[in-house]
Amino acid sequence: MGVSSGTEDAQVNDATGEKPAFHIGLAMAGAVSAGAYSAGVLDFLIEALSEWQKAKDRGDDVAKHDVFISAISGTSAGGITAALGLASLAGGVRSVETVSVNPKQTEPVRRVLPELYDVWVKNTKLFVARDEANEAGAAAGHRSLLDVGDLQSGKLPMSLLNSEMLTRTARAALSSIRPAGVRYPFFTNPTHLFLTHTNLDGIPYPIAFESDKSVYWMNLHEDRAHFAVTGLGQPEFPRQECSWLAEWEDAGDQIDVADINKLNGAPADQPFAAPQFEALAQAALTTSAFPFGLRAREVSAATANMRRRALPFRAGQFPATLKHSKLPGFPQAHFVCVDGGTLNNEPFELVRWTIRDLHEEQNARDPIKANRAVILIAPFPPPLTLASDLDKPRQDIGLGFVAKALIPALIGQARFKPTDLIAASDPNVYSRFLISPKRTGKEQDASPDLACGLLYAFGGFLDEQFREHDFQLGRRNCQWFLQKHFTLRPENPILGLKSRHGEDEVPIIPLVGTAADEVKLAPWPALPEQKLAELRAALERRLDPMVANSIGALLKGMPILRLAARLSWWRQRRKVVDTIMQIIKDGKKFADGSEIYGLVTSHQFEPLERRSIWTRLQDRFGYRRAVSLTADAKTA
């Protein structure tokens, strides 16, 4: 790729005297444990912007145009990454390097947002060894997702996994940040943050028909929290051209990152005294509340603001109509919500409308004219899902078939976004981009791209090596994306460069300083077989009280049935655990062609070295050592 000189300044608008800037909106898709990949992408993006800004401030010979991020949306794991990424940035861009936990890796692991890294890579674990699980302290019973501190005797479990562990991890991460007081030229003030969730109650919306004065009511379940984060960026959010939120009167809940110092020393097992940060923590936890796996969360909203949710279309007179519609007579509404990815796994449209210039019919897509873009970070771009038996009549389309197919069909339709995703995949559209995992140069073609992709993406919680690998892959893929794909034509007014015949496109964000150093491909990680014994023990420790509590709650007042159920569990316990462990290790194939990838099928299993009794006896009595010393003496 040709590189234009950075000595030419970007063109200045004659009418306003301002230099045009390139607007970015980030959309982070759901990813479960592969949120570590999204965290790596965001981490490198911040490093690249920071290093470029330092070079501009020093007067180096680099591109002088401006780029800023004005909106971020996130779903599930992407929501946690978005919220904690902005919070971590309040503490400054801090370069940290540590030794890899993968014994095959010699390069240090680098990051610039340490709190974000710690949450995703170091602190979110599926299990810990029995000794660590039993350690005393504030985190006792909540050190991993299989710990039992959340279970209450005689009550139904809130979720299959320990959700309280995630709550404490989020609070501990936020309270550990010390604000640096830095305002970044590459973020706007405010930066709009959207965290999606699936509202199980729904928000009622009236559609009035003038013909007969009747009202057609519908419930909105694809909900979200909206925060306006201040104190982080230098340039003001361009409200005049990006007026979508203003049309809907959707200002968002205000959060000043300078106030994060109020959280210092706050206990992780208690809600924050600062309500805006507790709301942020709960919104991040709500968007990742995977149904059944993690517990549902309650979200509160002022009744007066229930309808001030900007919807992805021009508002027109609709907000005024909503003001006159009948609302409940109570001041605060409480909604039960689960994972935002249930209905909206790629929250693309929220940031696209936030950064859109409403004076234009659409955002410019041509590389010579484009001045804003949405970048979708999707660790798991949806694969082709086509029934294997469409070529012949179905033999059984009874109740069982419909029951099995209906929920996936409803979720798939709710997530269907043809206009957004088709445009993002079009190489001729320069206003929508996609970053997804690509493990280029991998040593074995059979291995997948993500180490966290096994077990329906929950497998990354099995070992820190997996999450560390994907974090580094996210950084590597972001570097490649900025070098090769996130580009414009030199004559674009944002860049202000003179076109040269045959010149290639120019990076929107040039890589300088440490961002120019190649992010190397991390070695493929593997889980040592001996760790499966620790996992099995942790699984049994959670299953036993969880089943006992469920039986006690469901069969309360029925002692004979309760006794029979407990006896049945103890008879089936070993078989259940064996089945789960077998799936974790080897995966499982289903009759319809779908598959759960396990450790072995993903090439992430390191078996123990099987040594014969004779070999062990030789080692025990020193025979093998004596033979080795004799051979060395002869060689010498």
Image: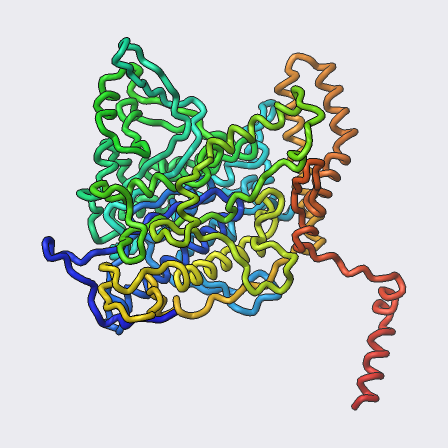
Q: What is the residue that sits farthest to the bottom in this orientation?
A: 636
Q: Is residue 184 visible?
A: no
For residue 327, which quarter of the picture?
Answer: top left
Residue displayed at 58% across by 39% down: 385
Question: Which quarter of the rendering shows the C terminus?
Answer: bottom right
Judge by depth and name the residue closer to the eye, 512 or 331: 512
| Residue 220 in picture, x, y percent from top left | 38, 25
* Left or right, residue 440 beside residue 211: right
| Residue 402 in picture, x, y percent from top left | 62, 23
| Residue 474 in picture, x, y percent from top left | 48, 56
Q: Is residue 449 visible?
A: yes
| Residue 235 in picture, x, y percent from top left | 21, 52
* Left or right, residue 576 beside residue 614: left
For residue 56, which quarter of the picture?
Answer: bottom left
Residue displayed at 33% across by 70% down: 502
* 75 up-or-down from 472: above or below: above
* 40 up-or-down from 628: above or below: above
Q: What is the residue that sits farthest to the top in this orientation?
A: 212
Question: Which quarter of the rendering shows the N terminus?
Answer: bottom left
* 189 up-or-down from 390: above or below: below
* Left or right, residue 78 beside residue 405: left
For residue 64, which quarter of the picture?
Answer: bottom left
* Left or right, residue 500 beside residue 222: left
Display colour scheme: rainbow
| Count of numbered badges drawn on the protein | 0
Judge by depth and name the residue closer to the eye, 104 or 501: 501
Residue displayed at 74% across by 19% down: 563
Judge by depth and name the residue closer to the eye, 317 or 298: 317
* 552 up-or-down from 241: above or below: above
